[in-house]
Image: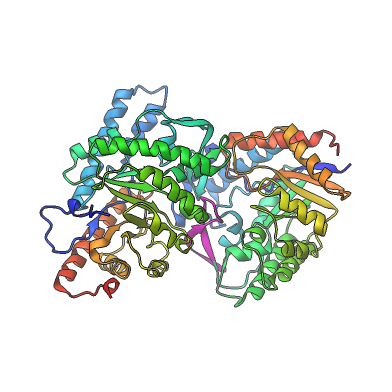
Amino acid sequence: MSDTREQFRPDDHDNEHFLLTTVVGSYPKPKWHDRARELFEDDGADFDEEEWEESKDDASRLITDEHERAGLDVVTDGEMRRNEMVEFFAKRIDGYEFNGRVKVWGHNYFDKPSVVDEVDYGESWLVEEYEFTSDVADAPVKVPITGPYTLASWSFNEVYDSEEELAYALADLVNEEIEALVDAGARYIQIDEPALATTPDDHAIVGEALERIAEDVPEDVRLGLHVCYGDYSRIYPEILDFPVEEFDLELANGDFEQIDVFKEPEFTKDLAMGVVDIHTREVESVAQIKENIKKGLEVVPPERLTVSPDCGVKLLPREVAYEKMANLVEAAREVEADLDDGTIDVPARE
Amino acid sequence: MPEVVATTPGLYPLPDWAKDDLADLKGHQRSDLIRGDEGGEIAAAYDRAREEVLQTQQSAGLDRIVEGQLRWDDMLAHPLAVHDNVDTRGIVRYYDNNNFYREPVIAGELTPDGDVATELDAAAETVQGGLQAVLPGPYSLADLATDEHYGDDAALLDGVAEFLAGETDAFPDIETLYLLEPSLVAEPPENGAEERASEAIDAVASAVDADVVVHTYWGALEEKVHAYLLDADIDAVGYDLVSDHEQTLYNVNEYGTKDDVSLGLVDGQNTLVETPAEIRERIEWFLGETTNDFGTVYATPNTELFYLPVNKFESKLESLAEAATEEVTA
């Protein structure tokens, strides 16, 4: 596999070492943007499509800037155009219907859709989002896209004989979308498969779906896979066979108890490690995050370590999300400097 | 012919207005979840939501009415999560679902605290007959917990069973108690623990003056677990026919079952709504394939129902109730 990582090193990067800093994707929406959505969805309000589009553009520009200000090497627009990671796509895919919200945890819900007919590529998913974001960003832009297994698993399947069949049908659509994104210039695509943590025994289905997606993706495009919190020992080392270059894993929630899972057998991909917990409002200090990053060096050498939050940060208050990112970047830069100076060890090299 | 009783294992979805109101009142974070000492507007919202789901069940025509367990932010771990001697830590996955609960860490003795009884008292004010209590079974509740007090699995299970039995002492008059035991399938006891699980269930069931159903789901029970479960003094075992009807049938025909039976016939995790005719067919299929002379067949969804959007949840209750009104022929 070619090295797709160097293209993301900023020209003015100070340190010899480079820990790629990025985010998983989602970010808290500005209150005025939520208000705009409410107005747009309220038939009685005097707020039209054009004004809603403007709100999305403004929010996207603002949060892209906020990511850059935090110093991240690769940014997103915080998914300002998306409401939710399954719903957004299901609204654009033919064959889905919506019946209402269901609980995920506590008072966090999502509008879990039902597949009531064969799925088909409807309208464009993310090309517009990518083009706008890369236009306003100076830094390279990553595109997170919900994976077919999660799209299948987090839907009610009323039609297909099995979830597996539905996942493969959706994989063909994801493949089509990624092709369009690559044509538009995207070079860093992260497939989100949080559902794999839910049903780890299905890793072979995810692998097969990824094969369908990765087919024809050019060599210079960095493909990552994000899998949220779960019992990683149930999917490791099998996931090393997946046709992606990077795994983005949630390890801070759980206090890195699972880090050892990835030491044996040897982790052969790039590791994008969650170093801040997104389930708590407490902002981790730079010193604390540095310690977390060093745990990643037990698994991979620095040239294969990406540093990110555990997961999307959208449920945090915006200022907390920002501080976590800013501290994450500062910690990464300090670890890089320490590596340059040779003052910290890299156990993964031993 | 057996009497068909339409009921549910509880843990309902919150009405949509309550999802919004309670999210606003409580918040979205781990530390915002229920503590058991809520009052004021939060308690009022839950009271109103409870009234609504009681009404929904009564309008649908269900034969047993559950409180709805709308306060159970932590699903089956709820009775521990609100307990004074239990700490809650990070959020952990709820079986193999896209749902999470706070990890309950037992730090002291589980003395009964009346949390579930208070809910039932509130429901009993509205429900004239057919009130059904719902509790996690002791095996599942112990399985969902982290123990830092009892010391070993056997002591933990005893402690949890004693706690649940103590909880039931404060219950108002109930017709039926459903003990939900998904862990018997998902994380089955082994190496001799099968008998202990059955004894713990027996301890809770024996404390209650009502029909006790031990409802299992997400697959069929392992043979040995099933065989031991039948040793407990309970009135019915609940089987998940949606997930695995073949192995379930084998278990029942090979080892027998109780005089009553609870059948998970409606998929609690899919929006496709079963028609009353389909539900009746499933009951008739089961009765046709078994030789038992059942007194009561509880017709129920296989799982808790909070997985569903409200409209489909309500449609499923209506289908179930209607399926139970017609004569079953088998």
- Taking the image as shown, residue B225 lies to the left or right of residue A153, namely right
- Residue B288, given in percent of the width and then of the height, sits at 83, 43
Q: Quadrant of residue B129?
A: top right
Q: Residue at x 22, y 54 (%)?
A: A5
The front one of A144 and B244 is B244
- Taking the image as shown, residue A174 lies to the left or right of residue B310, namely left
- Residue A89, given in percent of the width and then of the height, sits at 41, 36
Q: Decide whether residue B99 is among the magenta residues.
A: yes
- Residue furthest to the bottom in view is B151
The quadrant in which the C terminus of chain A is found is bottom left
**Is residue A45 visible in the rendered structure shown here?**
yes
Asked if B13 appears above or below B94 in the picture, the reply is: above
Q: Quadrant of residue A21?
A: bottom left
Asked if B309 appears above or below A71 in the picture, the reply is: above
Magenta stretch, residue numbers = B83-104
Q: Decide whether residue A268 is among the magenta residues.
A: no
Q: How many marks?
A: 0
The front one of B139 and A39 is B139
Q: Quadrant of residue A277?
A: bottom left
The front one of B273 and A189 is A189
- Taking the image as shown, residue B136 lies to the left or right of residue A254, namely right
- Residue A202, given in percent of the width and then of the height, sits at 51, 52
The quadrant in which the N terminus of chain A is found is bottom left
Q: Residue at x 10, y 54 (%)?
A: A12
**Is residue B27 visible in the rendered structure shown here?**
no
Asked if B129 appears above or below A281 in the picture, the reply is: above
Q: Residue at x 83, y 51 (%)?
A: B260
The front one of B139 and B26 is B139
